[in-house]
Image: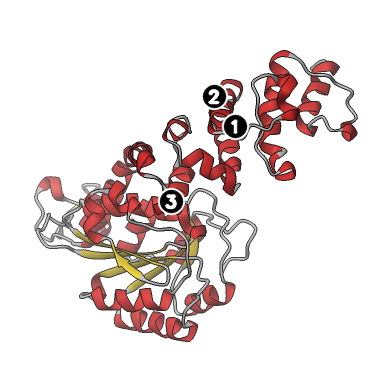
Amino acid sequence: MQNQEILTRWRLILGGEEADGTGCVLSGQEAQIDAALAALYEFERKRKFSYEQDPKNRKGGSESSNPSIARWLGDIRNYFSDTVVQVMQNDALKQPELRQKLMLEPEILEQATPDVRLVATLMELGKLIPAKTKDTARRVVQKVVDELIDKLHQKTIQSITGALNRSVRNRRPRYNEIDWNTTIRKNLKHYQAAYKTIIPEERIGYGRKTRRSLKDMVLCLDQSGSMGQSVVYSGIFGAVMASLPMIKTQMVVFDTEVVDLTEDLRDPVELLFGVQLGGGTDINKALNYCQQVISKPDDTILVLITDLYEGGNEQQMRKRAEELVASGVQVICLLALDDSGAPSFDMQNARFLSSLGIPVFACTPDLFPELMAAAISKQDLTQWAGDKEIVLKGQKTA
C-alpha cells in the first residue's frame, strides 16, 4: 500500500481535526466518504446532524431535515459494504435524535437495511411510530421475520422432532421405524461370533406420531429494553415450535406486567408488534403466571429469558423458582438469545438459580434448536453448554 493511501485512510479514521497530524487533504469521492463518516461520528460532539452532498459545505451544515438523512443513507450504501452499512446504521440508532429521524419517516425507513437490531429498535419505539410509517415498519419486520424463518425453521423442526421421536420408544417397530444404533447396543450380548452378526432379539424403534402433545414449552421473555434481540429470536422460535403438533407452546412476555401472547404465535409479525420494549422488570410476577398456566409439570420445559435484574420481590422470585423445580418443571434460564453472547446480568441471582440445578447461560440462535433437543432428551444442559464451549464473553459464568 502506498504512503499516500495509508495517510488517506488515517485521515478518514481521525476525522480531519487540527491534531490529526496527517496533513492530508481529501477531494472527490474520498471527501464524500469523509462527509458521511463525519456526519455520524462527529454527531456526539456537535449534537446536531449535519450532512450536505457538497463536501465544501458540510462544515456549515445547519440542515437537520429528513432529506439530509435520506442522502446520508444512500451515500453510505454506495461507499461501504453491507456489513459496514449495518454497523453505521446501528451506531446511528444509538443516538435518540437520529433514531427518531431514521425510524419515524417511511421513505427513510424503506432505505434502512433490515436486520434484527432494526426490528428491536422498531419494537422499542412502539406506539411512537406514526400511522404513516406503520405499514412500512410492518414490511420491514415481515422481511426480517421471513429471512429468519427461512434460516432457522428446518433445523428447529428436525432437532425437536428427532428428540421427541427418540423420547417415545417403540418396542414393536416396523422396519423403517427401527432405531439401529440403540437396537445394536441393546443386543450386543446376543453377538454370534460364528456368524459375525448380532441377533436382534429386542428391537427399539422411534416413537410414532401422536395427536396429543408430548411436551409443553413455555417461553417466558423479559421485554426490558436490553433484551430486544432476544425477544425477536424468541418470537421466531416460538412460532416455529407452535407449528409442531407434538408440542404445546406458550409465549409469555413481561416487564412490570405480564402479557400472554400465545395466540399471536400464528403470526410472528403480529406477535413482535405486540411487544413493548422498555420499562421495569418483575420476574417474580412472570413466574407466578407461568405456575398458573403449567398443567403438566413433569412434561414441561420453561425457558426463562432474562438478564435476572429483578425489580420486583427478589426473595419471592427465588422461592417461585424453587417451587417450579420441585414440581418437576425443567427450567432453563437464558441470559440472552442473540448473536452477541456477551450479556450483562445479575450474578447473584444467576448463582442462586444454578444452585437449584437450573442451567444458566447465554445462547446464540444457531444453537437454540440443539438446546431444545438436548432438553427434551433430558441431557445435562450445563455439560451440553460446556461441550458447545458456550461462555459469557467479558463476564463470569454463573
Q: Relative to 4, is 196 above or below?
A: below
Residues packed near mark 1 inside 10 Å, few (<14), some (14 to 19) or many (20 plus): few
Mark toward the viewer: 3 or 1: 3
Q: Is residue 271 visible?
A: yes
- Tell me the quarter of the image containing the C terminus: bottom right
Residues packed near mark 2 inside 10 Å, few (<14), some (14 to 19) or many (20 plus): some
For label 2, the residue is 74
Mark toward the viewer: 3 or 2: 3
For label 3, the residue is 128
Q: Relative to 146, is 370 above or below?
A: below
Left or right, 235 with respect to 227, comes to left
SS category of the residue bearing label 3: helix
Left or right, 8 with respect to 261, comes to right
For marks 3 and 1, give the CA distance.
28 Å
Question: Which one is nearer the viewer's eye here, 102 or 321?
Answer: 102
Left or right, 249 with respect to 317, comes to left
Taking the spot 49% from the left edge, 57% from the top edge, the residue there is: 387
Question: Which one is nearer the viewer's eye here, 232 or 134?
Answer: 134
| Residue 116 on image: x %, y % | 45, 44
SS category of the residue bearing label 2: helix
- Tell me the quarter of the image containing the N terminus: top right
Instruction: For the residues labelled 2 and 1, say whether their Cβ atoms are less than 8 Å apart.
Output: no
| Residue 349 on image: x %, y % | 53, 76
